[in-house]
Image (cartoon, rainbow, N blue to C red):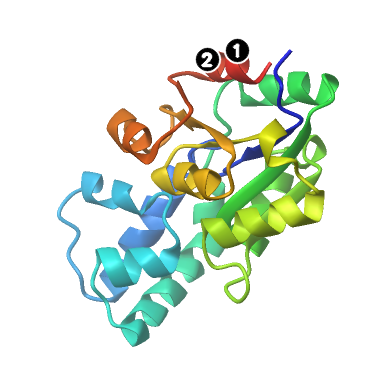
Amino acid sequence: MSKYEHILFDLDGTLTDSGPGIMNGFEYSLGKMGVDVPDRGFLKQFVGPPLSESFEKKLGFSPEDAARGIAYYKEYYADKGVYENDVYPGIKELLEQLKASGKKMIVATTKAELMANVVLDHFGLREYFDLLVATDFVERKDKIDVLKYAIETAGVDVKKAVMVGDRHYDITGAAHFGLDSVGVLFGYGSRQELEEAGATYIAETVDDLSKILL
């Protein structure tokens, strides 16, 4: 049996393939802002990071323009984008096995809390999790804030817990608290990104992830 008592999961790109909805949301927002999107591949970089980072750091918007861009994004995402999404094959079966084996599971995401709740309910994932921690844009703005709240609220023993995610934010956030981490390659991060961030394990497939966690 795995030594892990608590398993913290990222949501986008880890439990669900939310890329299409997120990319469509950015395409809509950038169109409203008068920014040309060179190709579909350009939009992949926005799957995973907090919205403020994407608009301000990646796109170079001022705080004021970033706020407008985020509002446009949310307009599209709440109406359509959140549903342009699918649970990765094998994830529900893995969650069932983990729950049956007595693992405590937490969703730790930088997705907005309202939208994270919509995803869990829409795809029937809520029953597997003991806690959802998402961003509230005030006290929880990034992955470290989210993980801090999750660890404190659930009483997580960091030596007996692991973070699962597809981007470097998940891996470096876990390392900040002394958590082991699994970087998954079926999401939106590359092997290089996850290895350079210091992932404890790399899982190419959901089956690989199952072997690590069970």
Identified by mark 1, the residue type is Lys
Residue at 56% in and 22% down: 89
Q: Quadrant of the N terminus?
A: top right
Whether residue 158 is visible here, answered yes or no, is yes
Disc 1 target residue? 211
Residue at the farthest bottom position? 64
Identified by mark 2, the residue type is Asp
Residue 116 location, x and y as percent? 64, 54
Helix, strand or loop for disc 2: helix
Disc 2 target residue? 208
User: Which quarter of the picture shows residue 145?
Assistant: bottom right
Helix, strand or loop for disc 1: helix
Q: Nearer the viewer, residue 126 or 2?
A: 2
Residue at 45% in and 50% down: 21
User: Which quarter of the picture shows residue 124?
Assistant: top right
Residue at 81% in and 43% down: 130
Above or below, 78 relative to 33: above
Q: Quadrant of the C terminus?
A: top right
Residue 24 location, x and y as percent? 38, 54
Residue at 80% in and 49% down: 154
